[in-house]
Image: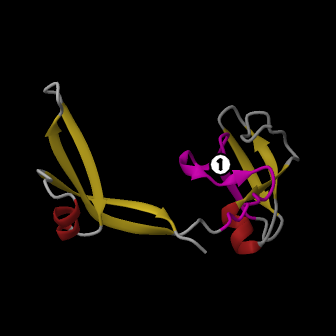
Amino acid sequence: MQTTFENAQKGDRAYCSLYGGICNTNLEIIKVTDNSITIKADVGNYEDIFSCNGTYRNNGNQILFWSKPVFEIPVRPKRLVKIQGFIGISMSRTHDTMLAYTTYVYPTEELVKKHGASAYKIIPISFEVEKGE
């Protein structure tokens, strides 16, 4: 699919988001050079120059297209709920002198201390999960 105007020819039709949005008009290509095209509006006999990549005089984003762009409306994203809490990490020695770590996750620091009795490190956490509908 060709989206720019390197192969445009005199008489081709185009759509400009600037003119189309204001005047609801299509454009006719009336002159083509190596690096620019000249268009004429259906309404008002107005002429203007665009680059071959569809930008207005090589400035900014493409606003000239072969036809009116059609946008797909996205569905509403899933709502996320922010969860905050604390991780408590306990460390203990096993019978062969290796260290064993146990991790506790609770919504408050006090619960980590209460249930993760010997927690030596408490880390605040925050993440988002999908909200149930």
Q: SS for tag 1?
A: strand
Is residue 66 one of those drawn in magenta?
Answer: yes
**Residue 53 or residue 82, whichever sits in front:** 82
Point out the image quarter for the C terminus. bottom right
In the displayed image of the protein, which residue is found farthest to the top?
96
- Quadrant for residue 127, please give it: bottom left
According to the picture, the residue beneath numbered tag 1 turns out to be 50
**Residue 50 or residue 54, whichever sits in front:** 54
Range of magenta residues: 46-75
In the displayed image of the protein, which residue is found farthest to the front?
95
Residue 10 point in image, percent of width and height: 85, 43
Judge left or right: residue 25 versus residue 125.
right
Point out the image quarter for the N terminus. top right
**Residue 119 or residue 133, whichever sits in front:** 119
The image shows residue 109, relative to residue 33, as above or below, that is below
Residue 80 point in image, percent of width and height: 49, 67
Residue at the (16%, 42%) spot, across then down: 91
Residue at the (25%, 45%) spot, across then down: 102
Total label count?
Answer: 1
Residue at the (65%, 41%) spot, across then down: 53
Residue at the (68%, 56%) spot, across then down: 48
The image shows residue 131, relative to residue 50, as above or below, that is below
Is residue 67 one of those drawn in magenta?
Answer: yes
